[in-house]
Amino acid sequence: MAIAWKPVEPSYKTYLQLIVLIDMLILAAIGIGIYVFVPTTSWLPNPLWFGIPWAALTLFFGLFWSARRFQFTAYARTAEAMYLRRGALWRLTRAVPLNRIQHVEVRQGFIERTLGLAHLTLYTAGSGGADLSIPGLKLNDAEQMKASLVNTIADEPTEDDDHA
Amino acid sequence: MPELTWQRTPLLTIGFFIAKEVRHLIRNITNLLPVLAVIFVSNSAWLPYAVGGGYLAFIIISAILNHHFFLYALADDAVHLRTGVFGKKSLTLKYERIQQAEIDQSWYFRPFGLVILRVDSAGSAGKEVEIPGLSIDAAQQLRQRMLSHAHSNHHEPEAGEIELKSEASPETEVVFSLKEIIRAGIMDNKIFVLLAVLIYPLSQTDVLEETVVPWLEANIAFLEESLWLNVALIVAALIVLFVLAIGVTLVRYYNLHFSILNKRYQAKAGLFTIRTVSFRYQKLQRVQLRQNLRGRLLKRFSLRVSQLQPSAHAQQQTGNASFILPVLTQSLVSNLCQWLQLPRHTNLNWQRIHFIALLSPSFWIALVAPSALAAAYFNDVPLTWSLLGAVSLWLMLQSYAIARWRNYGFTFDNGWLAIKRGVFGRKENWYPLYKVQQIDVYQSPWLRLLGYADILVHTAAGAEVIKYQPAQLAKQLQQDWTGQIGRNHQRWL
């Protein structure tokens, strides 16, 4: 039985590109700051030695990496579990059985809000951080998924272990 | 709601609060580093005494205040607590929500017949409540009440009484003799801990240089004449420490009782402080069977059962919270496996991982040998010797890697996932598969190239990696297991 993967919203790619751009701009600002404010820059190499790799990295992440990541990111919900796959080069497919979910969260960062995106996070017991976080969903879809998941969890039949 | 009767703990429990403060200090010792640094730098004669005295006064005053403001009330269905000197804290703990309730007979309370009741509740915050200074009977009754509530889940007043009656006669009981505990001490020797504890104060003062060394030189000068005598002396000292370290284990596990009652597994032990640790079968998340080299020589195992740990606490408290039986014979292990329903039998289908998993460690080890050779050669070691050294180093590391790979195995039997590993010591981890929280399939570019994937199994008691499975199989296993877990409606927590 193959899993019916659902892709995330295309604007997730824009979101990734924006994130890359912001991170690279911060790096660039630090670099420029060093060249401008450090009094003697003679020991530093020509700025191009940093500038060209910077540009290459920006292009790599902005075009190739974000496209690959967007392409691979997908989620699926079966009767028993929620699946998520993500990553571009290092790839992870994660499965969380629905009856192990502790709580569900919908979150929206600043950039996500401007793009009308949200991400849905499922938490399980035992591990510290977020466990399964589906990015690049429309806010409405995320809210809907959350509601349906919460319903499923609440209707979960439990049977006592004692006779086993 | 009936009026609560707030009680204060007996005056004696100030000792408990002092101990708590001291423990708090030791845990947060890094915060005091600046102060300590100032003391060392300032070189003043009175400052250390002032700081020490001030701190002592602080401990005692805060212990008295904490004792004064520690109020508890026992209702029919909950414990209420009111604590805090300045910041008031009010806590209600429903009996139903209680995960664990243990009775600690601390050494400083035992002569007075008092105990500490330690209660753990469910939930990610991992609230732990300690009520010191209860009488043994009261604590036992309270504990029964809490556990029977938690056990029967919903209001069944009779259940508590039944359990109270059966308290006297556990279904299964194992008592560990002194001999066995000494074996445990040999297996799990705390010699290095003891060494550190002894050496640290010695290194801080000048006792060693000023008193011990001159005395040794004056009185046993003949020592210097023989290297062997020196070696013998050091060995003897280590043996003495080793024996003392067995004493540490003895203090902790003296008179170890293991019992099973109503699916509740309990271990009770201690020479001065008698500690009880227990768990309910339902809450079991992992069983760990270990055997280190000494354990293999003595033909003994140790067993540790983990329950769900709120992750923030997991690192700090593993020692306290998990259930440990430090020394088990082979037959006891098989009994325990039966009691814990572990399908551990001799013809388990242990599966190895593909030998391609050796590729990447072998690559790094192969890099080590030439660099060791180069380092030796440039430090003027004769070429033959450096060659020999490098080759033997490489052989040792490589054979260790191979042995590690050969001894690794995983199996899936009767709803349990087991993973064994270890070259010198052996370790087996058993997880009830239906309690697994999430399953990952991970592929690095390298693994993708080879067509393999790692499976990560996250359980409530930690994660486990099964490396180098064929990618298709890994995905299949992930789906199968996830489906099985999803369709299993047994309670897992």
Image (cartoon, coloured by chain):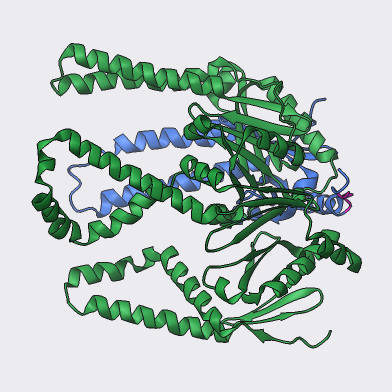
- Choose top left, top right, bottom left or bottom right for residue A43: top left
Assess whether residue B220 is covered by the magenta stretch.
no
The answer to whether residue B127 is left or right of residue B27 is right
Rendered location of residue B253, percent (x, y): 55, 52
- Choose top left, top right, bottom left or bottom right for residue A98: top right
Q: Is residue A42 above or below residue B97?
A: above
By secondary structure, the bulk of the magenta-drawn segment is best described as loop
Rendered location of residue B72, percent (x, y): 67, 81
At 73% from the left edge and 30% from the top edge, which residue is drawn?
A: B478
Q: Is residue A118 visible?
A: no
Q: Is A111 or B123 nearer to us in this picture?
A: B123
Q: Is A84 or B72 nearer to us in this picture?
A: B72
Q: Residue furthest top?
A: B384
Q: Which region is colored magenta?
A: A155-160
Rendered location of residue B234, percent (x, y): 25, 41
At 59% from the left edge and 67% from the top edge, which residue is drawn?
A: B105
At 11% from the left edge and 51% from the top edge, which residue is drawn?
A: B219
Q: Is residue B456 above or below residue A136?
A: above
Q: The chain drawn green is chain what?
A: B
Tally of numbered discs: 0
The answer to whether residue A144 is left or right of residue B226 is right
Q: The chain drawn blue is chain what?
A: A
At 13% from the left edge and 47% from the top edge, which residue is drawn?
A: B220
> Looking at the rendering, in which quadrant would you find the N terminus of chain B?
bottom right
Rendered location of residue B20, percent (x, y): 50, 71
Q: Is A33 or B272 nearer to us in this picture?
A: B272
- Choose top left, top right, bottom left or bottom right for residue B453: top right
The answer to whether residue B419 is left or right of residue B445 is right
Q: Is residue B65 visible?
A: yes
Q: Is residue A128 above or below residue B362?
A: below
